[in-house]
């Protein structure tokens, strides 16, 4: 399912002394099944942009088209669009409100009018997708779980709607390293298994480099850069001018190169760096 933004602008508190233009004539196309990273400094327009994708916000100017449906404030089919596009906010566990894990995940499908049999099926599938054990957790209070488990419950609640697009706004914020890694691996697994479109908003350049295929850089409400991971993270000076950096491992490779070690500098993940350094060491031994 294709996502198209045509000349989209969004103004907060229009016609007041506090008027702020958060999006400025954004044009964007995301194809079905892409895994896209969205980055930018605080206030660049990232969160405003993704909230347009399921009608939480509406364009002040321009059009947002999801599949065959245009998002409209009046007369549009917002219920249908919000089923297609699942949005997981930063700290999604704050969205939990039911007494049990089952009830919380079931809320969305029930609200759509599905039978209890279908609701149960969706809850089981959603919990399995985020590696939550159905039997041991379904009757527990979500507020008695660990932070990582609570976040999985919140994501499962979105997955139970069976969206075609999953938008995640800083999904690992506040988690410890293990919890962060688990969540990201599960998101990557969901993308691979379900072939859904994933849009990941993150301040972590390392996470964007590891998991996404395409990177969109926001700056002052505009799309400043759009390309593959390699294309974007080789433009170091431009990123720094936007208040952004590159993955830490890339800085390491530049320093090794500066020390005279013949390693490539267009490397952005630990795995790639390890392979490059081992290759250099083997070549040195065999010389």
Image (tube, rainbow, N blue to C red):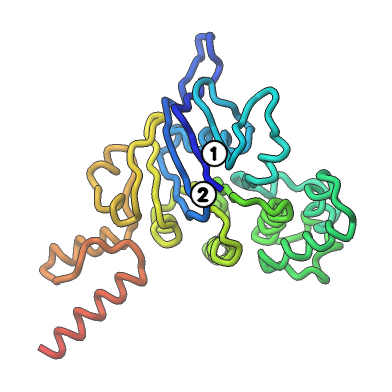
Is residue 280 something that shows in the picture?
A: yes
**Residue 230: mark:** none
Residue that label 1 marks:
50
User: Could you say where residue 14 lies in the image, as x and y percent from the top left?
Assistant: 54, 14
Q: CA distance from mark 1 to mark 2?
A: 9 Å
Q: Is residue 65 above or below residue 161?
A: above
- The quarter of the picture where the C terminus appears is bottom left
User: Could you say where residue 182 lies in the image, as x and y percent from the top left?
Assistant: 57, 66
In the image: residue 104, left or right of residue 240: right
Element carrying mark 2: strand
Residue under the point 31% across and 75% down: 274
User: Could you say where residue 119 lies in the image, as x and y percent from the top left?
Assistant: 83, 56
Is residue 150 something that shows in the picture?
A: no
Residue under the point 55% across and 35% down: 65
Earlier along the polypeptide chain: callout 1 or callout 2? Answer: 1
Specify few, some or many for label 2: CA neighbours under 10 Å numbering under 14, 14-19, or 20 or more: many
Q: Nearer the viewer, residue 48 or 182?
A: 48
Q: How many marks?
A: 2
| Residue situated furthest front in the rendering | 68
User: Could you say where residue 130 lies in the image, as x and y percent from the top left?
Assistant: 66, 64
| Residue situated furthest bottom in the rendering | 286
Q: Is residue 80 above or below residue 247?
A: above
Residue under the point 14% across and 84% down: 284
Element carrying mark 1: helix
Residue that label 2 marks:
199
In the image: residue 88, left or right of residue 63: right
Q: Is residue 206 above or below residue 219?
A: below
Q: Nearer the viewer, residue 249 or 25?
A: 25
Residue under the point 78% across and 65% down: 124
Mark 1 near mark 2, Cβ–Cβ under 8 Å? yes
Specify few, some or many for label 1: CA neighbours under 10 Å numbering under 14, 14-19, or 20 or more: many
């Amino acid at each position: 399912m294709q996502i198209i933004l045509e000349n989209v602008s969004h103004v907060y508190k229009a016609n007041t002394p506090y008027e702020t233009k958060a999006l400025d004539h954004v044009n964007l196309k995301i194809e079905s099944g892409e895994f896209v990273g969205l980055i930018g400094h605080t206030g660049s327009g990232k969160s405003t942009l993704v909230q347009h994708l399921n009608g939480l916000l509406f364009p002040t100017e321009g059009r947002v088209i999801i599949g065959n449906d245009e998002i409209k404030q009046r007369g549009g089919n917002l219920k249908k669009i919000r089923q297609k596009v699942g949005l997981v906010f930063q700290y999604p566990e704050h969205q939990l409100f039911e007494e049990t894990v089952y009830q919380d995940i079931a809320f969305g499908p029930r609200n759509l009018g599905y039978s209890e049999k279908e609701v149960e099926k969706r809850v089981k599938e959603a919990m399995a997708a985020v590696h939550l054990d159905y039997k041991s957790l379904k009757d527990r209070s979500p507020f008695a779980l660990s932070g990582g488990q609570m976040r999985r419950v919140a994501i499962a609640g979105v997955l139970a709607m069976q969206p075609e697009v999953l938008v995640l706004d800083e999904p690992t914020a506040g988690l410890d390293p293990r919890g962060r890694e688990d969540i990201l691996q599960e998101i990557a697994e969901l993308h691979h298994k379900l072939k859904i479109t994933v849009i990941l908003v993150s301040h972590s350049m390392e996470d964007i480099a590891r998991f996404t295929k395409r990177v969109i850089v926001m700056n002052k409400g505009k799309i400043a850069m759009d390309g593959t991971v390699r294309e974007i993270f080789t433009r170091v000076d431009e990123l720094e001018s936007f208040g952004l950096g590159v993955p830490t491992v890339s800085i390491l490779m530049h320093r090794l190169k500066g020390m005279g070690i013949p390693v490539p500098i267009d490397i952005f993940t630990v795995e790639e760096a390890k392979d490059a350094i081992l290759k250099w060491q083997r070549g040195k031994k065999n010389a």
